[in-house]
Image (cartoon, rainbow, N blue to C red):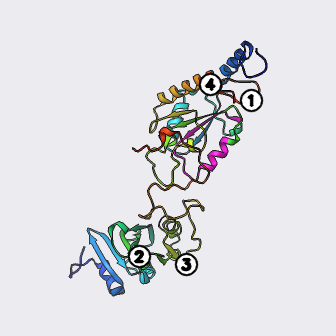
C-alpha cells in the first residue's frame, strides 16, 4: 500500500506533520516503523491517537532495547506498539533517549493508561525514566534490588539474594552446564 | 541401656521404629506450588497415580498442619523469604522434597531472578529431577522418602535424627 512517491500514506502523513523530527522509517508489507526524536515522542503518540487517519486507540505493548553490544548511539531505544481497532492496522513507534547515563523520555500514561505498568517494567529492567509517570517504581524486582537486570552490562552471574543463603554442598560449586 | 540417654536400647529402638512406621504412612503434604510442575503434582495426587496409596494424599494448606513440604516449581529471589517462612512455620518432624529441576538447582533459569536451588534457603531431604518429573518418578521419590523416614531415629522428645548420625 503506497502512494505515488512509493511511500506508505500513513508514514507520509507523519512525515508531513513532524518533518525533521522523524529520524528513520521502515515499511514492509504493512509492518510500519517510525523513529522519532525524544522531544516529539509524546506529540507523535498523541497525533497517532487523535488523528482520524491514524486513530491508533490501543497501546498493545511498550518495551525497550539496550543497544550497547550493537555499538549504536544513543544506547537505549523505547519501542511502542500501537493498534487501531477501527482500521485494523498496526504501527511501531520508537524513540532513542538522548542521554545514555540517565535515559529519560516522556510518559504516555496521560494518553494511554495502559502504558502505566509497561513503563514501570521498562524502568525496572532498563532504568529508563518516564517523566510524568504517576507511580514510577519497580514492578517485578524487589525494592532492595540494585541495578537493572536487562541492561547488557548487568553481569549474567550476578545474584542478589533477599535472605541469607545456606552454604551449598561442595560438589555443586563450580558446576557449569 | 534403654530409656534415657542417646544410646538406643531395645525398647527405644522398637518405639522409634513404630513411630517411623506411623509417620511414613501418614505424611501430610504442604504443596508449595509456584509453576508448571504443579500440573504434574496434580496428576500425581489425582486418582490415576493416587498418592493416597502411600498415605500422602491429603494436602494441608496450612504449614502448621503439614509435615512434608513439597516445593513444586521455580522459586524466585522475591519468593525466597516466603518459602523460608513457610518452612519455619512447620512443626517438627518435617521433611522437604524439591520437586522438579528448578527447585533442585534453578534448572535452566540461570539468571538474576531465580534461586539456584532451594537448598540455598532451606534444608532438602529429597531431590526429584525432571522438567517436569514423570509421575512415576514422584512415586519412586515418595517411597524413597518413606525409606528414609524409616531409617531415621524418632525419639519421643527432641528432633528426628538420621540413623547413624552423631548424637551432637
Residue under pointer 4: B149
Q: Nearer the viewer, mark 4 or mark 1?
A: 1
Q: Are marks 3 and 2 on the same chain?
A: yes
Query: Badge 3: how crowded within 10 Å, few (<14), some, or many (20+)?
Result: few
Which label was assigned to residue A55? Answer: 2
**Mark 4 and 3 residues: CB-CB less than 8 Å, in contact?**
no
Q: Is residue B105 magenta?
A: no
In the image, are marks 2 and 1 on the same chain? no
Disc marking residue A91: none
Mark 1 residue element? loop
Question: Same chain for marks 4 and 2?
Answer: no
Contact check, label 2 and label 1, Cβ < 8 Å: no
Outermost right residue: B4
Gap in Å between the C-alphas at discs 4 and 1? 15 Å
Label 1 crowd (10 A; few <14 / some 14-19 / many >=20):
few
> Callout 2 environment at 10 Å: few (<14), some (14 to 19), or many (20+)?
some
Label 3 or label 2, whichever lies nearer to me, is: 3
The answer to whether B159 appears left or right of A33 in the picture is: right
Q: Residue A171 in the image: x percent, y percent?
A: 48, 38
- In the rendered image, residue B78 lying in the magenta stretch gets the answer yes
In magenta, the rendered stretch is B65-87
Q: Position of residue B123 (x, y in %)?
A: 60, 38
Nearest-to-viewer mark from 4 and 3? 4
Residue indicated by mark 3: A132
Calculate the distance from the C-alpha at mark 2 to the C-alpha at mark 1: 72 Å
Q: At 43% across and 43% down in the image, what residue appears?
A: A175
Picture disc at residue B158:
1
Whether tag 4 and tag 1 are in contact, CB under 8 A, the answer is no
Asked where in the image residue A29 lies, by quadrant, the reply is bottom left
A43 and B161: which one is in front? B161
Amino acid at each position: 500500500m503506497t502512494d505515488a512517491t512509493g511511500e506508505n500514506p500513513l508514514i507520509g502523513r507523519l512525515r508531513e506533520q513532524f518533518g525533521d523530527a522523524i529520524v528513520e522509517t521502515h515499511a514492509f508489507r504493512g509492518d510500519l516503523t517510525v523513529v522519532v526524536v525524544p522531544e516529539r515522542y509524546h506529540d507523535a503518540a498523541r497525533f497517532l491517537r487523535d488523528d482520524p487517519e491514524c486513530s491508533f486507540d490501543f497501546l498493545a505493548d511498550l518495551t525497550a532495547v539496550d543497544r550497547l553490544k550493537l555499538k549504536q548511539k544513543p544506547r537505549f531505544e523505547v519501542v511502542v506498539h500501537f493498534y487501531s481497532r477501527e482500521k485494523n492496522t498496526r504501527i511501531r513507534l520508537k524513540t532513542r533517549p538522548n542521554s545514555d547515563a540517565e535515559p529519560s523520555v516522556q510518559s504516555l500514561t496521560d494518553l494511554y493508561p495502559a502504558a502505566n505498568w509497561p513503563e514501570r517494567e521498562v524502568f525496572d529492567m532498563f532504568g529508563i525514566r518516564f517523566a510524568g509517570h504517576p507511580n514510577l517504581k519497580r514492578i517485578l524486582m524487589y525494592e532492595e534490588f540494585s541495578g537493572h537486570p536487562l541492561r547488557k552490562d548487568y553481569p549474567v552471574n550476578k545474584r542478589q539474594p533477599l535472605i541469607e543463603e545456606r552454604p551449598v554442598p561442595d560438589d555443586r560449586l563450580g558446576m557449569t552446564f | 541401656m534403654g530409656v534415657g540417654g542417646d544410646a538406643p536400647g531395645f525398647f527405644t529402638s522398637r518405639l522409634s521404629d513404630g513411630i517411623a512406621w506411623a509417620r511414613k504412612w501418614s505424611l501430610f503434604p504442604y504443596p508449595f506450588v509456584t509453576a508448571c510442575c504443579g500440573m504434574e503434582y496434580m496428576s500425581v495426587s489425582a486418582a490415576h497415580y493416587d498418592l493416597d496409596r502411600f498415605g500422602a494424599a491429603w494436602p494441608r494448606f496450612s504449614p502448621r498442619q503439614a509435615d512434608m513440604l513439597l516445593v513444586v516449581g521455580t522459586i524466585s529471589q522475591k519468593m525466597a523469604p516466603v518459602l523460608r517462612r513457610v518452612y519455619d512455620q512447620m512443626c517438627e518432624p518435617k521433611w522437604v522434597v524439591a520437586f522438579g529441576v528448578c527447585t533442585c538447582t534453578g534448572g535452566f533459569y540461570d539468571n538474576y531472578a531465580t534461586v539456584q536451588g532451594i537448598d540455598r534457603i532451606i534444608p532438602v531431604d529429597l531431590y526429584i529431577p525432571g522438567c517436569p518429573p514423570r509421575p512415576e518418578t514422584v512415586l519412586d521419590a515418595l517411597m524413597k522418602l518413606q525409606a528414609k523416614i524409616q531409617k531415621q531415629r524418632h525419639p519421643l522428645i527432641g528432633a528426628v535424627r538420621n540413623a547413624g548420625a552423631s548424637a551432637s
